[in-house]
Amino acid sequence: MAIKKIAVLGAGNGGCTAAADLTLRGFEVRLFARSESAIAKLARRGEIELIEGGVSKKAAPYFMSPHLPPVVQGVDLIVIATPAVGHEYLANGLAKSLVDGQRVLLNPGHTGGSLHFANLLRQLGCKARVALCETVTLTYICRMPEPGKVEVYRRTTNLRCAALPGKFTSELVGEIQNVFPNVVAAANVLETGFSNINAVMHPAGMLGNTGWIEKTGGDFLYYREGIMPSIGAWIDSLDRERVEIVRALGLTPLRFVDIFHGAGLTTSAARDSGSAYHAIHESEPNFTIKSPPSLDHRYIKEDVGYGLVPMAEIARLLGIKTPVVDALITLASAALGIDFRREGLTLVWPESHRRNCKEYCATVFRRFIMRVGLCFDGFYSIQEMIDLSKLADEIGMESIWMSDHLCFRDSLTTCMALLATTQKIKVAPAPMSPYSRTPIISAMSVATMDEFAPPTSPPALQKPASPLIL
C-alpha cells in the first residue's frame, strides 16, 4: 500500500521541517505536538515557512493538533521526530491507537530506540501489527529560529535505516524511500543504533564547554568554536570504544568520520584525516549552528541517557572497557544532578519483567520439551555470572556449563560459586584441560563439588535431580 497520509509527531525543528517538506511534496500531513502552546503558535501562523538554499516556501499541513488519536487515525506512516526522552510518552499514547498495517519510523532511533519502543508497545498491550523502523539521524540538518520558520542546511545523504525485526528491512525501506529518498538499508537496528553520531560528538562538546555555555548562555558557534583539538581528541577516544563494541557485535566497524562523511556532513579530506576535530570543523552544514543555552538540553539528556548509557551497558555485557564513555556519563550525571545510569536506557529488568520472562520461558520449555543450558567462558565477572545463573535458574533452564580457559576465571572455583547461589539448575565444568590439571586433582575437585551439592537420588554421577552433572 502506497504511503499517502503521514503523521509527524513532534513540532521541533525536525518535525516542522518534515511537515513542511512533505506537504510541499504532495503528502497529506498531520502534525502533533505535546505542547498546546506550540500548536497554538503554528495555528496562528497557519503555515510553516521552509527556507532552503536561500529559497523560501510556505506549507500548510492538512491538520495540526496537541491530541494524538486524531493525528494518527487513518495514516499510512507515523514519523516520530522527537528526542528519545519523549518515546515513552508517545508509546503510551499510541498503544491503543495503532492499527494493523501502519508504519512507524523513529527519526532518529538513537541507540536502541526501536528495541525500547517495541518493548514499550508490548508492555502496554498493543495488539496492532505495525512495521517499525529507525534511522541513524534526522533526515534534515535544520534549525527553527522562530516558531513556524525552519532553515534547512542539508538533507542527510545515505541515511541508514533498519526495521525491527530485520527481515522486514528491505521491504520497509523501499516504502520509506518514496517519502525520504536519501534513506538506504542498514543491516539491522544494532547497526543504526551504534552509528549514533550525536552521542559520539555532543556530550564531549557540551561538557568540555560547560563554563563557556553557562557564562554566555550558549552565545558561540557550537561546532566551529566549541569543538577544539582537545575536545576532538575526546571524541576520537570515545569513538574507538564505540568501534570496539561494533566489532564485537559482528557489524561493519565504521569510524565517526566515515559515518559523518557518508551523511554528507564533511569533506573527503577531513574523513581521510581520521580526525573528529577536522571532520567537524569542515562540516559546512553545521557552520552557523549556535550552542545550546544550557546543559539542560537534548545534547546531554538524550545523547547521554539514550546514547552513551545503552552503549556502556552493551559494552559491559560484552566485557569491553569504555573509560571515556563512562567518564562522560559520570560528569553529565554530576553536572545535571541526574543519575543517567538509572534514568537512561539500560539493560536492567524490573522485577515485573523478570516474572513475565520466567513464566514465558517456563511455558516454552514445557511446551516444546526443550533442554536449554547456559555456558560461560570465564570472560564475565563472577558477580555477572552469578546474576545470570540466578535468572537462568528462575526461568527453568536445565544446566550451566563453565569452560576451562587458561588465563581466565577458574572453572571449578566458579562452579562452586554458582552451586552456592542457585537452587535447582545443574552446574558442570565443561571439558577440563588435562594439561593444566592432572586427572587425580580433577577428580578430587569434582568429588568435592559433588559433596557440596548433595544428591536427592543416586547414582552419584549424572543425577537427574542434582545441581551437579558431569
Image: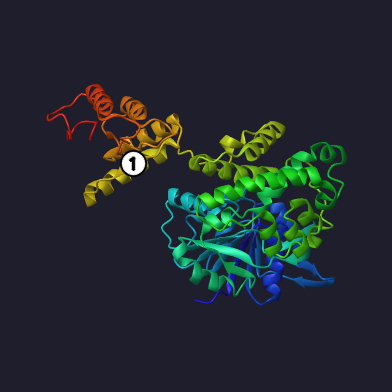
Which secondary structure lies at badge 1?
Answer: strand
Q: Where's residue 343, x and y in %?
A: 58, 37
Q: Is residue 112 left or right of residue 199?
A: left
Above or below, comparing residue 28 to residue 10 in the picture: below
Residue in the foreground of this view, choosing between 421 and 60: 421
Q: How many marks?
A: 1
The residue type indicated by label 1 comes to Leu
Q: Where's residue 205, x and y in %?
A: 76, 45
**Quarter residue 70 falls in:** bottom right
Locate the C terminus by quadrant.
Answer: top left
Q: Residues within 10 Å of mark 1 (few under 14, many from 20)?
A: some
Above or below, comparing residue 139 to residue 389 in the picture: below
Q: Where's residue 296, x and y in %?
A: 73, 41
Q: Is residue 163 left or right of residue 421?
A: right
Residue in the foreground of this view, choosing between 434 and 160: 434
Residue at image mark 1: 374
The answer to whether residue 428 shows anywhere in this view is yes
Above or below, comparing residue 346 to residue 26 in the picture: above
Residue in the foreground of this view, choosing between 143 and 341: 341
Residue in the picture at 86% in, 48% down: 220
Q: How is the image coloured?
A: rainbow
The answer to whether residue 147 shows anywhere in this view is no
Residue in the picture at 64% in, 47% down: 240
Q: Is residue 50 left or right of residue 162?
A: right
Q: Where's residue 260, x and y in %?
A: 70, 59
**Quarter residue 134 falls in:** bottom right
